[in-house]
Amino acid sequence: MKADDLRGQSPDQLRDQLTQLKKEAFNLRFQQATGQLENTARMRVVRRDVARVKTILSQKAAEAAAK
């Protein structure tokens, strides 16, 4: 997921995407705990995507507050 793609989305879409990513992160942690996780690199990607979405949401909020 690219930051430029995320910047084009509305805050509501970003919040929805954040919810989906958090659910995926939970499922990945659950799979890891039960020993069923095959692609361990996916955890890192999802965690970084969550951070990316949160960063862009805070940037949009700061931008709106400045106006």
Image: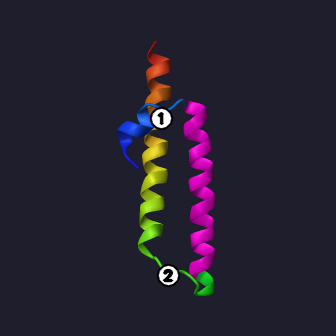
- Viewer-side residue, 39 vs 50: 39
Image position, residue 4 (x, y; %): 36, 37
Task: From the image, give the main secondary structure of the stretch colored magenta.
Answer: helix
Which one is earlier in the sequence, the residue at label 1 or at label 2?
A: 2
Position in image of residue 5 (x %, y %): 40, 38
Q: For the residues carrying marks 1 and 2, which lies nearer the camera in this image?
A: 2
- Which residue bears the numbered disc 2? 38
24 sits to left or right of 64: right
Asked whether the beta carbons under mark 1 and mark 2 sit within 8 Å of each other, the answer is no
Q: Residue furthest top?
A: 67
In percent of width and height, residue 58 lies at 47, 35
What residue is rendered at 49% in x and 36% in y? 57
Check residue 21 for magenta coloring: yes
Q: Amino acid at mark 2?
A: Glu
**Which residue is found at the position 57% from the left and 64% from the top?**
25
Circle 1 SS class? helix
**Range of residues picked out in magenta:** 11-32
Q: Which residue is mark 1?
A: 58
